[in-house]
Image: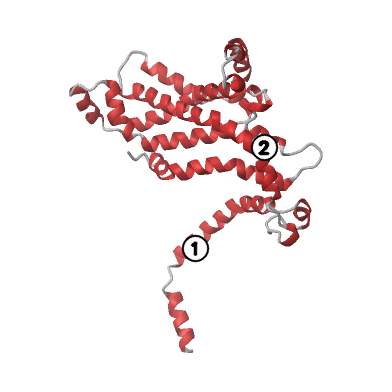
Amino acid sequence: MSTEQTGLTARFEGLDWRRVWLYAVLLGFAGFYLAPLESGLTTAFKTQSAFFETTPFVPAFGDGFTVSAWMDAWATLQGPMVNSMLFAIPATVLSAVLGSLAAYGLTHVDWRGQVVVLLLFVAGVFIPYQSVLVPLSRFWTIVNLQSLLAGVPFLAERVGLIELTVTHTAYGIPICTVLFRGYYQTLNTEMLEAARLDGASLWRVYRKIVLPLSKPMFAVTLIYQFTNIWNDLLFALVLVTSPSNQVVTLALNELQGSMVTQYNLQMAGAFLAALPTLVVYVLFGDQFARGVAGET
């Protein structure tokens, strides 16, 4: 046996084969999970003819490569993406803050009827969107926000977005409350009681102690709520009637076309529409991991 073969054999003998198999299996699952993403990304950079002439997972080169689908998708989605920001950000923040306050009241404040209210919040988590569409539509018809805001600059033209903000805030409070309550049960009760004995009010205890410790759970609820609200189509279909209030999910649905399906345009639009949620994950990723792990 040559010196080179002897060195190669010694190198393989030093390998931890269990770890090698573990990485191989993990890479296999990662590849299986990311395959649709890779197919969609390569499709977005193909011309329509190249899409039919090449296999889904192989990128196109030369005349088959184009960025026109991204430019066309951006031209269609940029306005609706701004509209989605206008209702998704306030609805996400409001539902998280109100859920945090409600959870604080249900966890660290003793009052009569606490259990009943908690059960109502838990029940609210399981109400599907479809079951509230008719009463929701009826409610906004009775409120008649269009008449109430007539003549008010900026707001009068965005009634649909205001209705979406209020609806998603109300719908998100139960799940945010349940998430925050589970987190607040892990806080050191003796520390909060000591602050109360020192004369701190309930609001001061929340603001000075509970709120700073809530960053990981705020990251969890903000990511969860923003993703749900940003991707919602059902409430938008019911509440958005004005073309100027069109949100990104409605615009993305219209990219499909009526006669010919432009697959590259749809894929490019889907990636552009997903960018804001990706940014939120990047911004709050560390805190999100701590919140899921139950760390303070």
Is there any visible trace of residue 186 in the rendered image? no
Q: Give the CA distance from mark 2 to mark 1.
A: 41 Å
Q: Which mark is residue 252?
A: 2
| Residue in view at x 33 percent, y 13 percent | 112
On screen, 143 above or below 53?
Answer: above
Query: Please, what is the three-letter code of the amino acid marked with disc 2?
Result: Leu
Task: Judge left or right: residue 193 versus residue 247.
Answer: left
On screen, 145 above or below 83?
Answer: above
**Element under label 1?**
helix
Q: Which mark is residue 84?
A: none
The residue nearer to you, when weighing 245 against 36, is: 245
The quarter of the image holding the C terminus is top left
Q: Residue 131: horizontal and vertical position, in percent?
A: 60, 21
Q: Residues within 10 Å of mark 2 (few under 14, many from 20)?
A: many
Q: Residue 211: horizontal and vertical position, in percent?
A: 33, 31
Counting residues from the N terminus, which is met first, the one under dot 2 or under dot 1?
A: 1
| Residue in view at x 46 percent, y 34 percent | 222
Query: Please, what is the three-letter code of the amino acid marked with disc 1?
Result: Trp
Q: Which residue is mark 1?
A: 21
The residue nearer to you, when weighing 172 against 190, is: 172
| Residue in view at x 37 percent, y 14 percent | 113
